[in-house]
């Protein structure tokens, strides 16, 4: 009644749309100043956080505030939380850019040299798994902390992964070591699996590891190797898939490498998706290759992303 008597019928309408809320803590000039500060290291030499921004705001408005406005202003100014992408200190950005420009030309050159054949671009990399525990976050009820049995040991198997980025087709092998001889076995198995030869050419992008670039390496027919610039794992498409390979062994305890091998063989998840077929082949038939930790078999899996 008081509002009606003072301002008439208009005072009884919904006034919430006219409520602009509390005034902003910072003026436009102070926001610009904060934006400039966030582009630099904080005064203590550490990393910017919501509480540090809130502390700076408190100094500007001369009163203490909660830490939440610090996070709010970080988001309001266009910032979000990221983990930096690592780059090797010896990486050459110019060579990396040159590789990106030249790779389509190399593919075109091979296509022109073999006009009657199918040409596909694949990527290849190796990843180490073993008896060192792999811990992953899992969903659990509030108030309960999951427990995983662990025992740190440093014995390894190696996943040889072949990925076609365009189609999502994958081929992976689990082998006991990395060497020129074992890589030749992996290439031969991969070439047979994908039908590489006179009628199908495979351009394989991989890093410059010694067993990849050795002049004594025997290449199967239809396989063409293209090497990445040195120290450039961020250009390797297959490199991003290795977190998936750890999923099958995460939060699990294996007593021996043979038990790990059996677990990978019978697990329904491959490093790149659902396994379509699995085969176990003895390396002893390849001419006496080394068998570290008495592991003489490997698992081959084909799938699709």
Image (cartoon, rainbow, N blue to C red):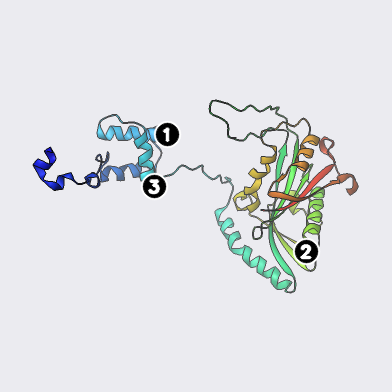
Q: Is residue 155 left or right of residue 9?
A: right
As displayed, is residue 257 above or below residue 124? above
For this rendering, which residue is in front, 57 or 15? Answer: 15
As displayed, is residue 17 above or below residue 202? above
User: Where residue 99 appears, x then y in whole percent?
Assistant: 61, 59
* Quadrant of residue 94 within the rendered picture: bottom right
Crowd around label 3: few <14 · some 14–19 · many ≥20 (10 Å): few
Instruction: Name the residue rendered at 19%, 46% in the picture.
Output: 13
Secondary element type, mark 2: loop
User: Where residue 286 appears, x then y in whole percent?
Assistant: 88, 49
For this rendering, which residue is in front, 72 or 109? Answer: 72
Residue 222: image tag: 2
Q: Nearer the viewer, mark 2 or mark 3?
A: 3
Residue on which disc 3 sits: 78
Residue 292: image tag: none
Q: Pointers 1 and 3 in contact (CB under 8 A)?
A: no
Q: Nearer the viewer, mark 1 or mark 3?
A: 3
Q: Is residue 180 left or right of residue 146?
A: right
Instruction: Name the residue rendered at 26%, 30% in the picture.
Output: 63
User: Where residue 152 appears, x then y in whole percent?
Assistant: 70, 28
Pointer 2 or 3: first along the chain: 3
Pointer 1 or 3: first along the chain: 1
Residue farthest toward the left in the current orientation of the protein:
6
Pointer 2 or 1: first along the chain: 1
Q: CA distance from mark 2 to mark 1?
A: 55 Å
For this rendering, which residue is in front, 250 or 80? Answer: 250
Residue on which disc 1 sits: 45
């Amino acid at each position: 009644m008081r509002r009606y008597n003072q301002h008439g019928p208009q005072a009884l309408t919904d006034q919430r749309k006219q409520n602009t809320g509390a005034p902003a803590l910072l003026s436009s000039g102070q926001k610009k100043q904060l934006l400039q500060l966030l582009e630099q290291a904080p005064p203590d030499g550490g990393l910017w956080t919501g509480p540090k921004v809130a502390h700076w705001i408190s100094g500007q408005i001369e009163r203490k505030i909660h830490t939440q406005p610090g996070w709010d202003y970080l988001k309001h100014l266009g910032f979000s939380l990221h983990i930096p992408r690592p780059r090797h200190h010896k990486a050459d950005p110019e060579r990396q850019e040159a590789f990106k420009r030249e790779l389509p030309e190399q593919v075109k050159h091979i296509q022109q040299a073999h006009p009657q054949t199918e040409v596909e671009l694949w990527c290849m990399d190796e990843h180490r798994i073993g008896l060192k525990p792999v811990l992953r976050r899992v969903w659990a009820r509030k108030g309960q902390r999951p427990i995983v049995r662990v025992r740190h040991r440093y014995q390894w198997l190696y996943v040889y992964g072949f990925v076609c980025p365009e189609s999502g087709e994958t081929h992976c092998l689990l082998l006991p070591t990395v060497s020129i001889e074992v890589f030749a076995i992996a290439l031969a198995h991969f070439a047979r699996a994908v039908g590489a030869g006179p009628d199908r050419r495979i351009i394989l992008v991989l890093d410059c590891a010694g067993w990849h670039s050795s002049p004594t390496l025997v290449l199967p027919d239809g396989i063409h190797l293209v090497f990445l610039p040195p120290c450039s794992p961020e250009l390797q498409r297959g490199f991003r898939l290795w977190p998936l390979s750890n999923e099958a062994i995460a939060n699990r305890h294996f007593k021996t490498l043979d038990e790990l091998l059996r677990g990978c063989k019978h697990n329904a998840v491959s490093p790149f998706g659902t396994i379509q077929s699995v085969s176990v082949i003895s390396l002893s038939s390849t001419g006496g290759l080394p068998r570290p930790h008495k592991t003489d078999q490997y698992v081959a899996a084909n799938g699709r992303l």
